[in-house]
Image (spheres, rainbow, N blue to C red):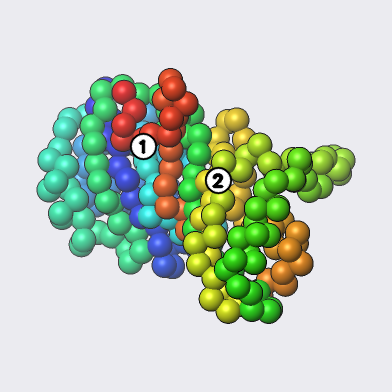
């Protein structure tokens, strides 16, 4: 089994692609590049491509991963160098590394780092926003209500899913945060939910349509519970 793990960026207009549309786009790119992909068996064979953690529509990423199973190895450097003629603007393969065998990408992912930018109706100083964030995170629980498919209301506590949160920049009405949140089978916190709850806690009125979210890192954890890159998995 030959697995090529690829780190890719999904930015600009590509952030508006759904995950299904991304899958179709990447498959078409690989076919045009004549990548020697392995296919599933059966009536309708599909290329064996797996993705790490699907992004919500509207969220950019500079650090996402996919695994593609190949029938033979290719020159990864040449593959990356020659991709320009095949890639739509905003989608780019950054790096590639071979694995002989690995757990599924989706099962490996444990944490995601995001940059979140919002605009609020009134200007604030950075020190004040930092003080508010510290108070927000110091709560015993940070909960919201969510309806399930049976219209039953569940109370969700997101505090265990917030690993880190920092104020990077504040200028007048613009606030930029960096957050590290749990992602994967043990829980999944969207940055939009975290930022909305923080803004509500502070009584910040967010300006609609001015939010920007970008995933800047995806991680798994080693045996010592240390964050490591998906390229570092053994």
Q: Residue at x 78, y 48 (%)?
A: 144
- On screen, residue 155 versus residue 112, left or right, reads right
Determine whether 99 is above or below 167 in the image. Answer: above
Residue hosting label 1: 229
In the picture as drawn, the residue positioned furthest to the right comes out as 152
Q: Residue at x 43, y 30 (%)?
A: 226
- On screen, residue 88 versus residue 107, left or right, reads left
Q: Residue at x 17, y 48 (%)?
A: 79
Indicate the quadrant containing the C terminus: top left, top right, bottom left or bottom right. Answer: top left
User: What percent of the width, then of the height, locates residue 191?
Assistant: 59, 53
Mark 1 and mark 2: span between their CA atoms? 17 Å
| Secondary element at image label 2 | strand
Dot label at residue 103 = none
- On screen, residue 52 versus residue 89, left or right, reads right
User: What percent of the width, then of the height, locates residue 90?
Assistant: 36, 64
Q: Residue at x 56, y 74 (%)?
A: 174
Q: Is residue 21 visible?
A: no
Question: Which badge, 1 or 2, is on the more N-terminal residue?
Answer: 2
* Quarter of the figure with residue 182: top right
* Quarter of the figure with residue 73: top left
């Amino acid at each position: 089994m030959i697995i090529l793990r690829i780190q890719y960026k999904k930015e600009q207009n590509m952030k508006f692609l759904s995950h299904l549309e991304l899958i179709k786009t990447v498959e078409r790119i690989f076919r045009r590049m004549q990548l020697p992909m392995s296919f599933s068996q059966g009536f309708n064979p599909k290329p064996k491509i797996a993705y790490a953690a699907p992004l919500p529509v509207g969220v950019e990423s500079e650090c996402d991963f996919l695994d593609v199973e190949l029938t033979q190895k290719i020159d990864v450097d040449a593959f990356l160098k020659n991709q320009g003629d095949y890639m739509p603007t905003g989608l780019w393969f950054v790096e590639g590394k071979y694995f002989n065998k690995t757990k599924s990408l989706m099962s490996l992912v444990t944490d995601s780092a995001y940059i979140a930018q919002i605009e609020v109706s009134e200007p604030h100083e950075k020190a004040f926003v930092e003080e508010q964030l510290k108070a927000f995170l110091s709560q015993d629980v940070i909960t919201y209500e969510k309806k399930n498919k049976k219209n039953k209301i569940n109370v969700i506590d997101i505090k265990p899913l917030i690993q880190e949160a920092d104020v990077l920049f504040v200028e007048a009405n613009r606030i930029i945060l960096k957050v590290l949140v749990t992602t994967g089978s043990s829980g999944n916190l969207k940055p939009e939910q975290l930022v909305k709850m923080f803004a509500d806690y502070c009584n910040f009125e967010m300006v609609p349509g001015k939010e920007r979210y970008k995933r800047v890192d995806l991680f798994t954890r080693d045996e010592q519970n240390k964050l490591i890159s998906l390229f570092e998995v053994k």
